[in-house]
Amino acid sequence: MLLVSTPLIVLGMLFLIASTVGLLKLPDLYTRAHAVAKSETLGLLLLFVGLLFRPELEIDASFRLAFVLVASLILNPTAVHALVRAAHRSGALPVQTVDQQAAETEITEALGGPPGPHGPHGPDDEEERA
């Protein structure tokens, strides 16, 4: 049983470490929540299943561990969804990075010429839209 439990526990710990790294490195709430919801849930699943296969675990402890596993599989994604939904409703915006040079090149290629002093569309576009 140790041949089954040890790799599952190690793999679960690796997913939990990846979840922590994602939480620390990703730029905004939405990407952090995605990293935590996915990898932490899978990491807990692997870790708890690995613990269930440990030979020194007693029957009553395995039932409690199974209950915590099922609860965490339900509550973790639900809590992350509620957090992201509350952030979205309160107006939290995701971080958006724009490569200005690439955007200007794309616009130039789409319009067929270099941008003028008033931008890629010229000075008359604002008047036509109004």
Image (tube, grey):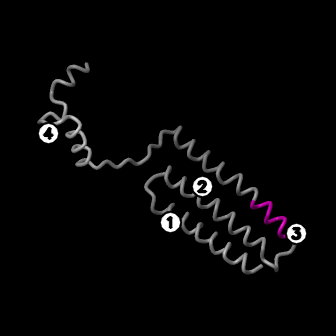
* Amino acid type of the residue tagged 2 in the rendering: Ala
- x, y percent for residue 11: 62, 71
- Residue linked to disc 3: 60
> How far apart are the two marked residues, 3 and 2, measured between alpha carbons?
29 Å
Among numbered discs 3 and 4, the one appearing first in the sequence: 3
Q: Residues within 10 Å of mark 4 (few under 14, many from 20)?
A: some
> How far apart are the two marked residues, 3 and 1, measured between alpha carbons?
34 Å
> How far apart are the two marked residues, 2 and 4, measured between alpha carbons?
45 Å
- Residue linked to disc 4: 114
Among numbered discs 1 and 4, the one appearing first in the sequence: 1
- x, y percent for residue 121: 19, 31
* Amino acid type of the residue tagged 3 in the rendering: Asp
Among numbered discs 2 and 1, the one appearing first in the sequence: 1
State if disc 4 and disc 3 touch (CB < 8 Å): no
Q: Residues within 10 Å of mark 1 (few under 14, many from 20)?
A: some
State if disc 1 and disc 3 touch (CB < 8 Å): no
Q: Is residue 107 left or right of residue 12?
A: left
> How far apart are the two marked residues, 1 and 4, measured between alpha carbons?
43 Å
- Residue linked to disc 1: 21
- Residue linked to disc 2: 37
* Amino acid type of the residue tagged 4 in the rendering: Pro
Residue range highlighted in magenta: 60-69
Q: Residue at x 69, y 78 (%)?
A: 6
Whether residue 23 is situated above or below residue 17 in the rendered picture: above
Q: Quadrant of the N terminus?
A: bottom right
Q: Residues within 10 Å of mark 3 (few under 14, many from 20)?
A: few
